[in-house]
Amino acid sequence: MNKICFSILYILILSGLTFAGDGIKNFYGVTIVPQYLAPGADYQTPYYIISSKKNKTPSPIVVIDGGMHGDEVAGSYACDDLLINLRVTQGTVIIVPRLNKPACDKVTRTRYVNFNQIYDMNRNFPGNADRDMSNYEAIVADEFTNLIKEYTPVLVLNLHEDKDFNDDRVNRYDCEDFYMGQVLISCHGKCDNFDFDALIDDTTLLYAQQLINTGMADDHKFTIINLPSAPEKGYSQDYFRDVLGIDSYTVETYRNGSFGSGPPVFEYGYELPNRVKLQIITCLSFLKTYGVGFEYADNDNLNTLTMPKRY
């Protein structure tokens, strides 16, 4: 896709275009029809399956989710872009652009402007199957967990953003989840048995990191931080990895200075177009790492990352 086409797409997604209804016609002329988590509810959540074989879901299967926190918008826009520009030639990619649709609609971290852990979708996994309508976050978490169990992907990639840049540019183990901007998060072990001097030895993640960072400016490059695994706290990544045995990583781009208190102030952190490109590059690198064959129609645009500006 040329730069003009990307610009049009970018304007459309920023204007709040929702890809649903009869589906999305992508760059390759294929219409991708949405399916739904919690179908029929006012918070029903579209997801899309892009496969190398019509009406089938061949391996390897990778799931990409964005919008678990509604003010971390770059991941959702990256998902929108992939739906338009990605053609899968081997395997299956399942994309959930806005996992927490009510929060995404409001551009707030959770359904409410005033942050409360109870309503943080990433504290509600594996979900609540009793369909308690007072807590849609747990219901959607349950539906998403069931989707993961149904398709048993080789990877679940979670797209997030952080308001603070990670200045310690060394792959490391850490017990604190602060300053996560430009970080790839893994979760292994517990704080009480961490070897903080150990080298990160997840060869799959290290390979993905190498692909992602090739040719990037230093401040754009992603560092790996391994956090303690805590599925009991309701984190999706930790549950998928420790309980279901599925690889799961989180991408954090460096965004802005607001935190769940209203629309983001984009003059802080990296500019939104750069963050979207960084998320796309990361997704494509993980797809390659996990053996998904694909074509991507807008590589020229990904080569237009401007020099990073930090505030």
Image (spheres, rainbow, N blue to C red):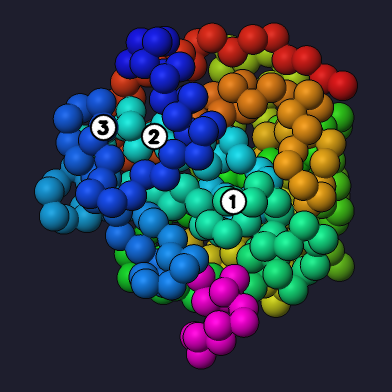
Residue 41's spot in the image, x, y percent?
43, 72
Q: Which residues are magenta?
A: 129-140
Q: For the residue labelled by badge 3, is the local secondary structure a helix, a strand or a loop?
A: loop
The quadrant of the picture occupied by the C terminus is top right
Element at badge 2?
Answer: helix
Q: Amino acid at mark 3?
A: Asn
Where 14 sits versus 309, above or below?
below
For marks 1 and 3, give the one nearer the viewer: 1
Residue with the most extreme left position: 54
Residue type (three-letter) at the residue carrying disc 1: Cys
Dot 1: within a 10 Å radius of its alpha carbon, few (fewer than 14), some, or many (20 or more) residues?
Answer: many
Using residue 297 as the reference point, say whether residue 204 is left or right of it: right
**Which residue extends farthest bottom?**
130
Task: Tally the marks.
Answer: 3
Q: Earlier in the sequence, mark 1 or mark 3?
A: 3
Residue of label 2: 82
Sequence order check, earlier mark of 2 and 1: 2
Q: Quadrant of residue 162?
A: top right
Q: What residue would you read off at disc 1?
A: 104
Residue in the foreground of this view, choosing between 195 and 210:
210
The residue tagged 3 is 26
C-alpha span from label 2 to label 1:
18 Å
Q: Check disc 2: other Cα within 10 Å, few if <14, some if 14-19, many if 20+.
A: many
Q: As shown in the figure, which amino acid type bears the numbered disc 2?
A: Leu
* Sequence-first disc among 2 and 3: 3
Asked whether residue 248 appears in the rendered view, the answer is no
Residue drawn at x 57%, y 59% is: 102
Residue 122 vs 3, above or below: the answer is below
Is residue 49 rendered to the left or right of residue 205?
left
